[in-house]
Amino acid sequence: MDTTGSKPRIEPCAKRVRAFLGGRPVADTVRPVLVWEHPGFPAYYLPAADVRTELLTATGRTEHWPGLGEARLFTLTCGDRTAVDAVRSFEGSPVAELRGLIRLSWRAMDAWFEEDEEVFTHPRSPYTRIDVLASSRHVRVEVAGVTLAESRSPRLLFETGLPVRFYLPRTDLRLDLLTASPLITHCPYKGDAEHLSADLDGRRYPEIAWSYRTPLPESQKITGLVAFYNEKVDLYVDGELQERPHTVFG
């Protein structure tokens, strides 16, 4: 959440959005509103008329959200499922566009759908674009002076707001130095990512690479390829060491 107190970016959305809890729809709207509570991605705010408000119980608690005002908290009960403090209403918000809207906690719901496609992690931003391009650039990845990967057939993934990611064929990796990690992360644009750690001279470098075994349709070009966190490795492109970017992944 933005802690600056400035008014967030707010835009209407034309998608049909549904949220499910306990296997049942608790919200169904064709009038969702996108609210950027922080710069990274938006949240869905839904018209109260399109939320099953009869399932809500006021908790008597409130939260102050900088820039948005006081939020009243509600518990949502559907069937045998209860989501405590999972609903927020900004009835008295200084931001007029938020009055009459309800925010459901993304993680508290069982599933979210945009039209008839399930969406994971958070709503997709209309301003995020992903391009995957085949390349013949020479890419080398090192950690502590040890080469972990070297390829002349990378695929470059360009995603709005993030560093370029270099996806490499597994045959170009030192797989003997890499081990699977139990960590799974989720991206609404690419899918579920499995992670790899490196073991070098008795030291572990955790979760320095990832791969999408079955990416979402728009990212099929990176299926099975492996990318390293630019933030955690020494990455050389055409012989030139790349500056490590500063991101939340560092």
Image (cartoon, grey):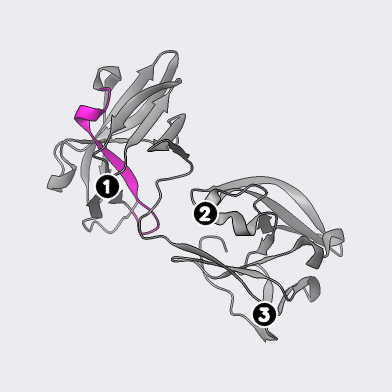
- Dividing the picture into quarters, in which one does residue 225 lie? bottom right
Which residue is nearer to you in this view: 228 or 245?
228
Q: Is residue 21 left or right of residue 33?
A: right
Circle nearer the viewer, 2 or 3: 2
Q: Secondary structure at mark 1?
A: loop
Query: Distance from label 1 to label 3 (Cα)?
Result: 39 Å
What SS does tag 3 mark?
loop
Which residue is rendered at x = 34% and y = 46% of the image?
43
Q: Mark 2 vs mark 1: which is more N-terminal?
A: 1
Q: Which residue carries the number 3 mark?
A: 137
- For the residue marked with disc 1, what is the amino acid? Cys
Q: Does 162 appear above or below 115?
A: below
Query: Which amino acid type is shown beneath numbered disc 3?
Result: Arg
Q: Is residue 136 magenta?
A: no
Residue 123 seen from this side: yes
The residue drawn where x is 73% and y is 48% is 181
Residue 137 horizontal side relative to residue 74, left or right: right
Q: What residue is pinned by disc 2?
A: 218
Q: Is 49 part of what is drawn in magenta?
A: yes
Q: Secondary structure at mark 2?
A: helix
Instruction: For label 2, count other residues whose C-alpha is less than 10 Å away and answer few (under 14), some (14-19) or many (20+).
Output: few
Amino acid type of the residue that numbered disc 2 sits on in the rendered structure: Glu
Q: Which one is in front in this view, the residue at disc 2 or the one at disc 1?
A: 2
Question: Residue 184 in the image: x percent, y percent?
Answer: 63, 45
The answer for how far apart the CA atoms under marks 2 and 1 are is 20 Å
Q: Which residues are magenta?
A: 38-52
Q: Position of residue 90 (x, y in %)?
A: 20, 38
Location of the C terminus (image quadrant):
bottom right
128, above or below 85, in the image: below
Determine contact: label 2, label 1, CB under 8 Å. Answer: no
Which residue is tagged 1?
A: 13
